[in-house]
Image (tube, helix red, strand yellow):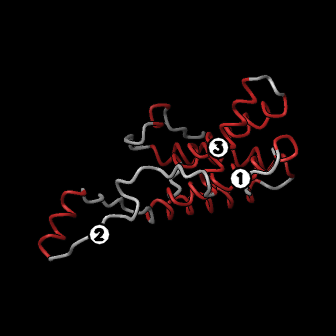
Amino acid sequence: MTITAVQPPDAASDPKHPDHDRWVKDRTLKMEIEHAQLVGLTLRDAEAENARMLARAEQKAKEAPTVVAKPSPIAREQRHAARGITRKAPKNAGKPECSCGLCIPCRRKMRVLAIFRGRAAGHPVLFALSEDIKSSFVVRIRDSIAGVRKGALDRALAARIDAICDRSIPTMGEWRK
């Protein structure tokens, strides 16, 4: 009597193929066996770990959240109008950005502009600070892509820029006065 292994065909890598489940199990079992050999475990340990990981993946797939479409702003306004709900515009809606020069956001903006002017003049410390400012904006963009809320993004960016402005104090003097 001869025992031969039954291998699923390469076409089984397609999720629509009838032998796809067997193909996934064979591939993952092969990886678990290689790992078990590296760490000195038995083949039974590798098979048990593979079964556990496949069961976990199957459970995760069953628990996948369903995506609910967000209603359009027009539909929201129509629902609110039908219910008699009125919404107030945000306090700063339609207002231009403050340019008083006295509040912290204005002072932060003026310090950032001064740092970039110093960069253009060739000051090495201000060049390094300007690079940090640019990287802060890159981090903000990356986090916005990752789905972080806008308010949290704005607070984090302001905190990073404030820290950079504070590092400019030895070179440029106090900025929060």
Residue at 49% across, 33% down: 9
Vertical comparison of 56 with 133: above or below: below
Residue 102 marker: none
Q: Residue at x 48, y 48 (%)?
A: 21
| Residue mark closest to the camera, 2 vs 3 | 3
Helix, strand or loop status at disc 2: loop
N-terminal-most mark, 1 or 3: 3
In the picture of the structure, the residue carrying the numbered disc 1 is 162
Which quadrant would residue 34 be assigned to in this image? top right
Look at mark 3 in the image and give the residue it sits on: 110
Q: Which of the pair 139/105 is nearer the observer?
A: 105
Within-10-Å neighbours for mark 2: few <14, some 14–19, many 20+ = few
Q: Is residue 77 left or right of residue 82?
A: right
| Direction from residue 160 to residue 77 in the image, left or right | left
Q: Residue at x 24, y 56 (%)?
A: 72
Nearest to the observer: residue 71 or residue 153 = 153
Q: Nearer the viewer, residue 88 or 65?
A: 88
Q: Nearer the viewer, mark 1 or mark 3?
A: 3
Q: Earlier in the sequence, mark 2 or mark 3?
A: 2
Q: Position of residue 139 (x, y in %)?
A: 63, 44
Disc 2, disc 1: CB below 8 Å? no
Where on the picture, by quarter, is residue 31? top right
Q: CA distance from mark 2 to mark 1?
A: 32 Å
Q: Which mark is residue 88?
A: 2
Q: Percent from the top left, x then y, of residue 176? A: 73, 56
Question: Label 3 neighbourhood size at 10 Å, few (<14), some (14-19), many (20+)?
Answer: some
Which quadrant is the N terminus positioned in? top right
